[in-house]
Image: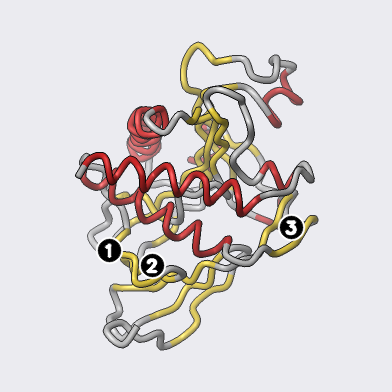
Amino acid sequence: MKEFPKTRLLYEGKAKKIWETDKPELLISEFKDSLTAFNGEKRSSEEGKGALNNMISSALFEYLQKRGVPTHFVKMIDEKHMLHKRAEVIPIEVIVRNIATGSLSRNLGIENGKVLPFALVEFDYKNDELGDPKLNDQHCLILGLVKGRDELEYIRYMARRINTLLQRFYSELALKLVDFKLEFGRDEYDNIILIDELSPDNFRLWDAKTNEKMDKDRFREGIGGVTEAYREVLDRIKNREGEER
């Protein structure tokens, strides 16, 4: 990483370390091998998981950018490091659901595996101390998490647009995009851009034929084979890229 040296650790989270570089507008994400679930109550680590998440995220950011989605992604430096733009994080986790499972089934009694009539977009407050509670539009405005209703509508619109693109992408890999989490931020020009990562850590992916889980639910539910599943997702992405060439 001679071209972009890490100068100072800015932040360390559950899955990544964020480093400053010698260019103030650029940061480096270092993907960790740690696994966490249930707000950090369950913890483990699997060698190679961080590299897989970085490579999958980089491929998806590139795919979305080519289709007009503004993101913080600049390039993948190496297997564990991603170069990206600095952004002010908007503390809202945007959840997009296509198929009922997990908390949606538990809380509302919707049959697990039921395809929803339309993509459901939910907001969670990105706040570990409060347990990432659910938000409605009025909560977002009262808490000042966005600069107005128009920003909130733009985030919702972008989430649906990204969902449409990624459903198409994953269908070509014989995978169902069940649900996923997105994060957004503001760049130096105050534009809202997609940030964070796009990996099986925050996506639920099921095999299209068998419904086998190919995501972090394998860790949450104690199924095992986390890195093997992530590697299978990456292999399918690479095969798709090979076919495009």
Amino acid on which disc 1 is placed = Val
Mark 1 vs 2: CB contact within 8 A: yes
Dot 3: element = loop
Is 149 situated above or below 37? above
Amino acid on which disc 3 is placed = Gly
Q: Residues within 10 Å of mark 1 (few under 14, many from 20)?
A: some
Quadrant the N terminus occupies: bottom left
Mark 3 vs 1: CB contact within 8 A: no
Q: Residue at x 34, y 36 (%)?
A: 158
In this rendering, position of residue 20 left or right of residue 51: left
Amino acid on which disc 2 is placed = Met
Dot 1: element = strand
Residue 244, horizontal then vertical, whole percent = 22, 40
Q: Residue at x 42, y 58 (%)?
A: 55
Tell me which label, 1 or 2, sits earlier in the chain: 1
Measured in 3D between alpha carbons, the distance from the residue under mark 3 to the one under mark 2, in whole angstroms, is 24 Å
Quadrant the C terminus occupies: top left
Q: Residues within 10 Å of mark 3 (few under 14, many from 20)?
A: few
Residue 41, horizontal then vertical, whole percent = 80, 56
> Which numbered tag is attached to residue 82?
2
- Total residue callouts: 3
Q: Which residue is mark 3?
A: 40
Q: Residue at x 72, y 19 (%)?
A: 108
Residue 50, horizontal then vertical, whole percent = 54, 63
Q: Which residue is mark 1?
A: 74
Mark 3 vs 2: CB contact within 8 A: no
In this rendering, position of residue 135 left or right of residue 6: right
Dot 2: element = strand
Question: Which quadrant holds residue 36?
Answer: bottom right
